[in-house]
Amino acid sequence: MIKRMGERTLELTGMPRVVGFGSAVGKKEGEGPLASWFDKIFTDTTMGGETWEKAEAALQRKAVGLALESAHIESSAVNCVFAGDLLNQCISSSYGLRELGIPFIGQYGACSTMAQTLALASVVTESGAADIAAAVTSSHFCSAERQFRYPLQYGGQRTPTAQWTVTGSGCVLVAAYENGAFLAENESLSKIGAHIARQIGVAHVCCGRIVDMGVTDANNMGAAMAGAAADTIYRYLEDTGTKPEDYDLIVTGDLGKVGSQLLYELTEKEGVDLRPRHNDCGLMIFDLEAQDVHAGGSGCGCSASVLCSYILKKMRKRELSNVLFAATGALMSPTIVQQGESIPGISHIVHLVNCAD
Amino acid sequence: MIKRMGERTLELTGMPRVVGFGSAVGKKEGEGPLASWFDKIFTDTTMGGETWEKAEAALQRKAVGLALESAHIESSAVNCVFAGDLLNQCISSSYGLRELGIPFIGQYGACSTMAQTLALASVVTESGAADIAAAVTSSHFCSAERQFRYPLQYGGQRTPTAQWTVTGSGCVLVAAYENGAFLAENESLSKIGAHIARQIGVAHVCCGRIVDMGVTDANNMGAAMAGAAADTIYRYLEDTGTKPEDYDLIVTGDLGKVGSQLLYELTEKEGVDLRPRHNDCGLMIFDLEAQDVHAGGSGCGCSASVLCSYILKKMRKRELSNVLFAATGALMSPTIVQQGESIPGISHIVHLVNCAD
């Protein structure tokens, strides 16, 4: 059942379960601190594709394949997929998943897409509209650079506030769960140990509003997103009557160093100190100094690949059991930034809990 | 309650009600056969904006405003908005709706977006996740031309199969309804005559798969989408055990002349004759000969503005009472078409019924 809490939060009382997930990343990500947590590291970041866009589509296809494998199910068992990415017309998603035959619901939430897709997948499974739904997103450094900034060959200088778009993808499969059993009538879910399949649940979701901090610098995405993250996190805590200390980890998507600092300042004004529990996927995926990524990692694939590796695996190991996943997106478009507009941000939250026996 | 029917169709037993809708279009649309049905016709298609992109954002903002007005509710009563458009990073939606403060869930379904957003808005209200949800999309001839084809100033020749992107937007507001009453606790809905507010319901939705017919001609979108329309319509009829004759109107989004013909041929192979009940928003919105639009209208705003004017108003007049709305999208991106890829299509269905006493 879906229960409304406060202004914007939804409680999913049946807690749809994360029955499978997969992550695939590029070479640079595979050299970072989370290397050992990823399912697949491509040392050739073309992934065998002829273009960067086709490479990114292949990355997303791989993540979905890994998630299906980990849940021991076929794509035909998935009732719908919520997918999106940063590229114009979300082509990594449509071309990456074209052959799967799963009903496709294209999403655009910029770098908040992993939380947006996972929130929708959880809501539709909890509502009875789907037995199993998939959530997936990706980004690729090379396709993002040429679309949003400069051709790679140009060798543009990066500002200190700039972030490095992660080459990576993550996919989560959620299944409806009620009274100790999966609703899916197929036997596939029973193939994985039921204790594993039912271990991680989605307890709450909270969809964000567009928040515009007036940032016009396309090299400072962290600042553009911090306001949205603060807004949604504050709203969620108020709606649920909880404090940061109630969670093991409050993880934002890709605020990086600049955005995270700003997030602390903004939430402090509301009397909330996030520091003791907060981390940011953009700070976790790279060694900022050694890998020369300036303010941190970014891109839809950043929070997606960190969620679908380190975070969910730590939850399966029972080393994390109560995580607020707040992916963050800068709704940035070169077209309208060149027309003098500021860059609005958005952030959605998914609350993951460990339901291990 | 949401009930699964067959492979992919969802029955919304409470039938969320269309409590408000609004349409806004440009000059050329205001000179076409549906002129008298639109709520607002802008004779200046810049809508006072400095750029075509800002014009389109203004168009979308207008449609949402008209829908809110028609339902006599404030934006604060809307729990979430599903919005998307054709522009890179869906900027008409994010910039058009930025100031509204409604939780925002960005969508990308190309020209199928009106059905996609309306399907999701209906599912979330029926599930209890929202009392009132909005669905909105738009397109603008000038912003679409320069993004997908040529700068307007270039004066490119149009092929006979080309369609004319509609400058238009449509917004629908749906509200949860159960046991003869709205679930929304605010009194706003009672301000409109309850018999009007509860008149049109969403009975079923069916989400489509990506279907690629191998079309590589960016000037033949109708052909690229026909396969997806045939797939979803056929699936829906099978799932629900109904025939075309059971509906007053089966209306596709923007197949135009070429795509509609192809749709007939494809469904005929499955033994389904759509001709007696079928029409296409792209054929309805323009006088193809007199307005020189070649194969018909297209764009997200085509099906959106036709739905939110002629179709829903005809339903309120009780002249239509059983409509299958099958918006159709070509997931076209200049980037990947230039890389030699074909253009996949998608189509989603929303089944609207007249619940008048």
Image (cartoon, coloured by chain):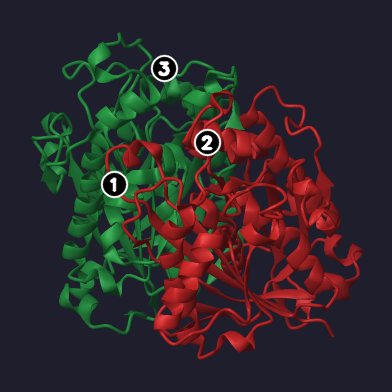
Chain colours: A red, B green
Do marks 1 and 2 both belong to one polypeptide chain? yes
Q: Quadrant of residue A344?
A: bottom left
Residues marked 2 and 3 touching at CB (< 8 Å): no
Picture residue at 51% right of the left edge, 87% below the top: A240
Q: Describe the element under mark 1 as helix, strand or loop.
A: loop
| Chain at tag 2 | A
Q: Describe the element under mark 3 as helix, strand or loop.
A: loop
The mark found on residue B79 in the picture is none
Task: Estimate the spatial distance between the alpha carbons at disc 2 and disc 3, rounded to whole Å.
Answer: 39 Å
Image label count: 3
The mark found on residue B219 in the picture is 3
Q: Describe the element under mark 2 as helix, strand or loop.
A: loop
Report x, y in % for residue B165: 30, 28
Query: Is A293 rendered above or below residue A263?
Result: above
Q: Amino acid at mark 2?
A: Gln
The mark found on residue A157 in the picture is 2
Q: Is residue B278 left or right of residue A167?
A: left
- Counting other residues with Cα less than 10 Å from the Cα at mark 3, is it few (<14), some (14-19), or many (20 or more)? some
Q: Nearer the viewer, residue A295 or B232?
A: A295
Whether residue B46 is visible to the viewer of this picture, yes or no, is yes
Q: Nearer the viewer, mark 2 or mark 3?
A: 2
- Counting other residues with Cα less than 10 Å from the Cα at mark 2, is it few (<14), some (14-19), or many (20 or more)? few
Picture residue at 69% right of the left edge, 48% below the top: A169
Picture residue at 53% right of the left edge, 57% below the top: A112
Report x, y in % for residue A229: 47, 68
Q: Nearer the viewer, mark 3 or mark 1?
A: 1
Q: Nearer the viewer, residue B55 or B22?
A: B55
Q: Amino acid at mark 1?
A: Glu
The mark found on residue A341 in the picture is 1
Q: Quadrant of residue A250?
A: bottom right
Report x, y in % for residue B89: 43, 43
